[in-house]
Image: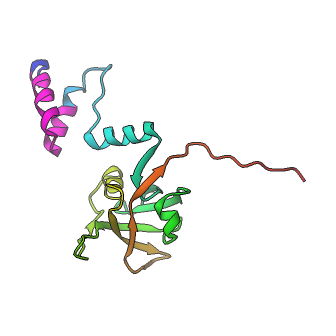
Amino acid sequence: MGKLTCKLELSALAKKGTTLKEDAELKSCFEKDKYAHYLSPVKHKSLQEEVAGHFDGLGLEIALGQDKASVLVKGIIPGGPAEKEGLLKPGDIIRAAGELRSDGKTETQSFKGLTLEEMAALLKGPQGTKVVLEVWRDGRKLAPMVVAIGRVNTVYVRSKLVVPG
């Protein structure tokens, strides 16, 4: 893609959002420019939340599971919805998530084939949204868990005063 084509594509797509194919095309516009970097809409939103010091989600510290098709719960963020509900624990594996609709029905989406960023996006959303999780603990599938999304304040440094003796 030439420079002029990239500029036209960027301005047109910025107005309407991007599909995965368009996202890949936009990324290619930046490959030869060492001073520019393209952020996908998902990564851009994640960066904005990081800078703001809060986000709307479940309050989980996560990593990609060993099977690359799940999320490993590494920790629970203090004060977040997951801590308040008390259902999830570090070491839990989340393999699917979906929104609990007002009619009581839900359709969970498997994490298979998704990136960690895409999995994390399924665990975030507007405050009050109820998310149904498929959770595995100690090799066993647990009953579906429902956790409401809420405001989570991000903490980058944790400290603890230890008195000698």
Q: In this rendering, is residue 11 above or below 141?
A: above
With 128 as the anchor, is 9 left or right in this view?
Answer: left
Residue 12: image x %, image y %?
10, 30
**Is residue 26 part of the magenta span, yes or no?**
yes
Residue 78: image x %, image y %?
56, 56
Residue 5 lies in quadrant? top left
Work out which quarter of the rendered image holds the N terminus and state it.
top left
Q: Residue at x 39, y 65 (%)?
A: 148
Residue that sits furthest to the right in the current view: 165
Q: In terms of depth relative to the viewer, which is nearer, 115 or 152?
A: 152
Magenta segment boundaries in residue numbering: 5-27
Q: Residue at x 50, y 46 (%)?
A: 154
Q: Residue at x 32, y 38 (%)?
A: 44
Q: Is residue 66 visible?
A: no
**Is residue 9 part of the magenta span, yes or no?**
yes
For the rendered model, the colour scheme is: rainbow
Residue 81: image x %, image y %?
46, 62
Q: In terms of depth relative to the viewer, which is nearer, 127 or 15?
A: 127
Work out which quarter of the rendered image holds the C terminus and state it.
bottom right
Q: In this rendering, is residue 160 above or below 137?
A: above
With 80 as the anchor, is 99 left or right in this view?
Answer: left
> Which secondary structure type mostly characterizes the magenta part of the structure?
helix
Q: In this rendering, is residue 4 above or below 63?
A: above
Q: In terms of depth relative to the viewer, which is nearer, 125 or 2?
A: 125
